[in-house]
Amino acid sequence: MPPSYNVYSRKMVEAIITGVASLVIGVGSGVASLSGRTNSRMDRIDKRIDEIELRLAEKYVPRQELANALQKMEDHMIRIENKLDQIVLRNG
């Protein structure tokens, strides 16, 4: 083989290796950037879901709990009515 062919072949291999290395690094950094943005977005969505869950927990009243509270209030109102009826009957 002539020496010029070896030099040309060697330079070509070096250029290909450099190109492939650059491509791999470029793709790797692109994937890392995309992954970072995806993780950042997932974190924001997770925080928003946590805020919604907290608001629901603060404002939500289970149906049975509300029914029990209303029943207690009604029972108190009935007792007050009965006492008022007794007062009216005594003074009536």
Image (spheres, rainbow, N blue to C red):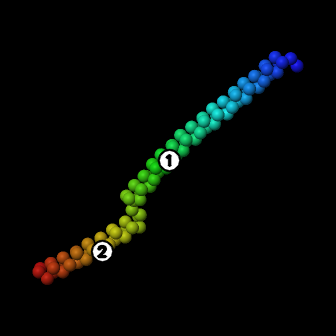
Q: Nearer the viewer, mark 2 or mark 1?
A: 1
| Rendered image: mark on residue 43 | 1
Residue 19: where, in percent of width, then height? 69, 27
Which residue, as the protein is rendered here, is positioned at the far bottom? Answer: 90
Question: Closest to the observer: 80 or 18?
Answer: 18
Which residue carries the number 2 mark?
Answer: 75
Residue 64: where, in percent of width, then height? 41, 67
**Which of the 4 quarters of the picture holds residue 87?**
bottom left
The kind of residue tagged 1 is: Asp
The kind of residue tagged 2 is: Asp
Question: Closest to the observer: 7 or 61?
Answer: 7
Residue at 88% in and 19% down: 1
Q: Earlier in the sequence, mark 2 or mark 1?
A: 1
Against 45, residue 72 (above or below) is below
Against 59, residue 90 (above or below) is below
Against 46, residue 9 (above or below) is above
